Image: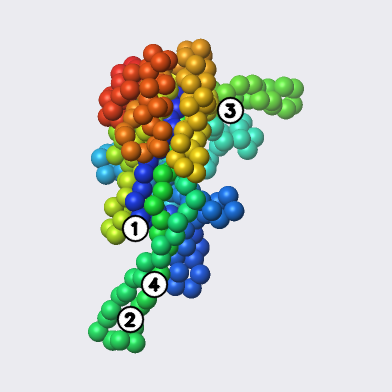
C-alpha cells in the first residue's frame, strides 16, 4: 500500500469572508498576511471544514468532538484522522511517557494569491424593539486560494507505545511497540473518504450567506511510496494570476524521478496562463484530467 498522498490545489472563491479575524467593534475583518495585502484562511479553518465535510457523509464513524475525544482510533475516524492523543493511565513501567500518535492529515492555510480588494457588507438585524436592532459590518473579498495537504497513509489508524527494559536498578527505554494498527482495507476506506471530502470541501464560516467552497479546481496530486511534503507550493501564482510554468515542470520531473505517481487536474478560467500551463504539463507525459477523474485515479493508485 502507498505511504502518502500530497496535494496542492487552487480554488476560486467569490465575494466572501471564510475565516474572520478578531474584528473591531461591529466590524468583522478578513484575515490578512504579507503586509495586510492578501487574504488567508487558517490551516485550522481548512481542517475544520474538511472534518465537517467528513461528518456529513460519515457521521456514524466520526464519533467525537474535539472537546470530548474517545481516543478509540480503531473505530472512531474523528479521533484517528484528527490526530487526538488522549491522556490515559500509563503502564507502571512507562515512566511518564505516553503512546505516540500522528496527525494523519497535514493542511496548510488557504493563502490568497491576489492583493485584496475589500468590500464591506452592511448587515442589519431588526427586532420588535427598535432599541435592540443590530448593525454589523463584514469585510468581503474574492480571490484565488492556494491550499496544500498531505495524507500520511501509513500512520492512519496506527499508534505506538514505549517499551522499557530492566537495567540494573533502573529501567531504560527499549523501543516503540504498536498498540493499534488497523487493516489495510480499513485504512483504504478512510483514505478514500478523505479524498472524497477534499473533492466536496465545504463548511467554512458564513456558508448560509456565502455558499463558497474551496474544493480543488486546479490541482497537482502525488501518490507516494515515501512520506514527504514536497510540492505543497507548486501552484504559486503572481499578482496577475499566472503560474510559474518552469516551476511546474521542475516539480513534475522531480516527482517522476522520485517514483511518485503524479496527477494533474485542470478547470479553465482559474489561472490566467492556464492553457499554456496545461500544454506544458502534457509535454511531460501527464494527461490533463478533470478534478473528479484525478480523485478517482488517486483512489485506484492507493491500492
Question: Which quarter shows the C terminus?
Answer: top left
**Separation (CA) of disc 1 from disc 2:** 20 Å
Query: The residue tagged with tag 3: helix, strand or loop?
Result: strand
| Earlier-in-chain disc, 1 versus 4 | 4
Question: Which quarter shows the N terminus?
Answer: top left
Q: Which mark is residue 133?
A: 2
Q: Mark 1 points at which residue?
A: 206
Q: Name the residue under label 4.
A: 136
In front: label 3 or label 1? 1
Left or right placement of residue 265 versus residue 156 in this view: left
- Name which residue lies at 29% across and 52% down: 211
**Separation (CA) of disc 3 from disc 1:** 44 Å
Residue 22 visible in the current orientation: yes
Q: Name the residue under label 3.
A: 162
Residue 294 pos. (x, y %) = 32, 25
Residue 291 pos. (x, y %) = 30, 30
**Separation (CA) of disc 2 from disc 3:** 59 Å
**Mark 1, other Cα within 10 Å: few <14 / some 14–19 / many ≥20:** some
**Separation (CA) of disc 1 from disc 4:** 14 Å
> Is disc 1 in contact with disc 2, using a CB cutoff of under 8 Å?
no
| Earlier-in-chain disc, 1 versus 2 | 2
Query: The residue tagged with tag 1: helix, strand or loop?
Result: loop
| Earlier-in-chain disc, 2 versus 3 | 2
Up the image or down, 89 lies above or below 251; here it is below
The one nearer the camera, 41 or 68, is 41
Residue 156 visible in the current orientation: no
**Separation (CA) of disc 4 from disc 2:** 10 Å
In front: label 2 or label 3? 2
| Earlier-in-chain disc, 3 versus 4 | 4
Amino acid at each position: 500500500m502507498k505511504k502518502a498522498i500530497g496535494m496542492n490545489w487552487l480554488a476560486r472563491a467569490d465575494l466572501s469572508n471564510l475565516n474572520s479575524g478578531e474584528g473591531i467593534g461591529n466590524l468583522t475583518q478578513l484575515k490578512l498576511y504579507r503586509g495586510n495585502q492578501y487574504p488567508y484562511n487558517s490551516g485550522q479553518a481548512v481542517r475544520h471544514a474538511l472534518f465537517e465535510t467528513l461528518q456529513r457523509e460519515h457521521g456514524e464513524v466520526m464519533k467525537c468532538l474535539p472537546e470530548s475525544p474517545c481516543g478509540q482510533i480503531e473505530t472512531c475516524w474523528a479521533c484517528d484522522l484528527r490526530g487526538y492523543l488522549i491522556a490515559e493511565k500509563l503502564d507502571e513501567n512507562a515512566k511518564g511517557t505516553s503512546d505516540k500518535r500522528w496527525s494523519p492529515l497535514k493542511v496548510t492555510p488557504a493563502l490568497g494569491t491576489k492583493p485584496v480588494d475589500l468590500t464591506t457588507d452592511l448587515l442589519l438585524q431588526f427586532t420588535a424593539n427598535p432599541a435592540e436592532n443590530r448593525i454589523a459590518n463584514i469585510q468581503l473579498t474574492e480571490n484565488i486560494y492556494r491550499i496544500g495537504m498531505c495524507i500520511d497513509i501509513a500512520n492512519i489508524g496506527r499508534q505506538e507505545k514505549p517499551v522499557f527494559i530492566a537495567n540494573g536498578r533502573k529501567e531504560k527505554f527499549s523501543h516503540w511497540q504498536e498498540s493499534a494498527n488497523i487493516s489495510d482495507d480499513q485504512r483504504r476506506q478512510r483514505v478514500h473518504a478523505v479524498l472524497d471530502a477534499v473533492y466536496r470541501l465545504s463548511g467554512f464560516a458564513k456558508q448560509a450567506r456565502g455558499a463558497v467552497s474551496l474544493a480543488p479546481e486546479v490541482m497537482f496530486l502525488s501518490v507516494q511510496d515515501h512520506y514527504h511534503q514536497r510540492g505543497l507550493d507548486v501552484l504559486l501564482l503572481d499578482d496577475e494570476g499566472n503560474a510559474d510554468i518552469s516551476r511546474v515542470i521542475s516539480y513534475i520531473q522531480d516527482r517522476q524521478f522520485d517514483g511518485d505517481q503524479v496527477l494533474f487536474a485542470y478547470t479553465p478560467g482559474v489561472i490566467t496562463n492556464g492553457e499554456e500551463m496545461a500544454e506544458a504539463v502534457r509535454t511531460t507525459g501527464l494527461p490533463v484530467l478533470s478534478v473528479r477523474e484525478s480523485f478517482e485515479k488517486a483512489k485506484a493508485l492507493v491500492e
